[in-house]
Amino acid sequence: MDLPNFAFFRGRIVPYSEARVGVLTHALNYGTGCFAGIRAFWNEEERELFIFRAPEHYRRFLESSRLLRMELPYGVEELTDATVELLRREDHRRDCYIRPLAFLSEETLGVRLDGLKPEVSIVSFPFGKYLDCEAGVHATISSWRRIDDGVIPARGKISGGYVNSALAKTDAERAGFDEAILLDAAGKISEGTVANVFLIRNGVLVTPSVTDGILEGITRRTLIEFARDEGWDVEERTVDRTELFLAEEAFFAGTGVMVAPIVRVDHRAIGTGQPGERTRKLQSLFFDAARGRLPRYRRWCLPVHGKRTNLVAAG
Ligand code: PMP
């Protein structure tokens, strides 16, 4: 990965080398930070970089910060503006990833949340695929359980919570799989390490509901909207592990992974063992929408260089 040239840090854009913290920083010791992961897609015909669903990402970012009792000095508009400014300075002419972070920045001891100053940083860098979206991935059901809402809320994108994902991902890769799927405390499917899980069962698009220990994914919401617009049946509900084995298709959905077909789980083929037709359809809608090529979904694409006439903070 290429390091960024610049960072938004302490309220302004500085060289990346100046965005530094000390080793006693509270968030570094206790995981008391939260973050977002946003993508921007380069559209070659329009010579434009589009940030995908920035207001929705920043709204969730602010929600995560509230769970950590942080009072950030910025709102959705200011964070979005800072991101546009940062991307203009970086002048990326290809797909990139944006990483906003809010963290308790004081260099002090004491495990608590109140009375500690938060800091916000935003960086961006060129970024391609995270998982194989073409051939698909081989996933395993992890022996690590997903963090519960009563432990570290999965609904928040909380830095410390990602130790759970890192444990599951590492063990999956060491055992020869590409990715992990985590079950919740009740043994029901929650999500992947950095993505939501979907399946097609009896022709219906099925995904765990937002109360099943998942991050409320923005890609998840996007794909559900595509599916409904296509006239498909969609169910957001508790999903049993064995439903995955019987599904016609399955895939991961998230900003990093985008739409990645799951073709095998624990050496069992899903459907034909090849990426499915519905998955392919959602993939192509996603890529076209994210590059600003579908007028119907253009409201989700914020142009970095052109005028911001299309921005709608859609819920
Ligand atoms: N679940 C987890 C645990 C994640 O880290 C992510 C990535 N942010 C997702 C789901 C997908 O969320 P989104 O589509 O908003 O990127």
Image: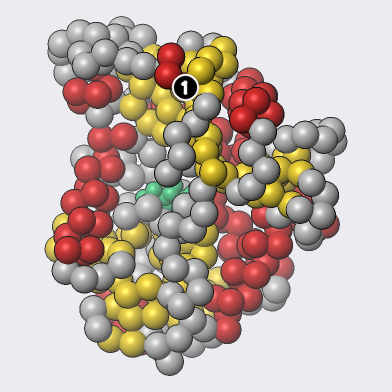
* Image quarter in which the C terminus is found: top right
Q: Residue 283 at what x, y percent from top left?
A: 59, 69
Q: Is residue 298 visible?
A: yes
| Residue pictured at 51% horizontal, 48% vertical | 127
Mark 1 near ligand 1 (CB under 8 Å)?
no
Question: In the picture, residue 110 is in which quadrant?
Answer: top left
Q: Tell me which residue sits at (58%, 77%) in the image.
A: 280
Q: Is residue 53 visible?
A: no
Q: Looking at the rendering, which quadrant does residue 304 occupy?
A: top right
Q: Nearer the viewer, residue 243 or 61?
A: 61
Q: Quadrant of the N terminus?
A: top left
Q: Is residue 90 left or right of residue 259?
A: right
Q: Is residue 194 found left or right of 175 in the rendered image?
A: right
Q: Residue at x 43, y 57 (%)?
A: 130
Q: Amino acid at mark 1?
A: Tyr
Q: Is residue 164 above or below residue 191?
A: above
Q: Position of residue 135 (x, y in %)?
A: 46, 78
Residue 142: where, in percent of width, then height?
20, 64
Coloring scheme of the render?
secondary structure
Residue shown at 70%/73% (left/top)? 230
Residue wearing tag 1:
16
Q: Residue furthest bottom?
A: 272
Q: Dot 1: within a 10 Å radius of its alpha carbon, few (fewer than 14), some, or many (20 or more) residues?
A: some
Residue 295 image-quadrant placement: bottom right
> Where residue 114 appears, x then y in whole percent?
29, 12
Left or right, 312 with respect to 70, comes to: right
Element at label 1: helix
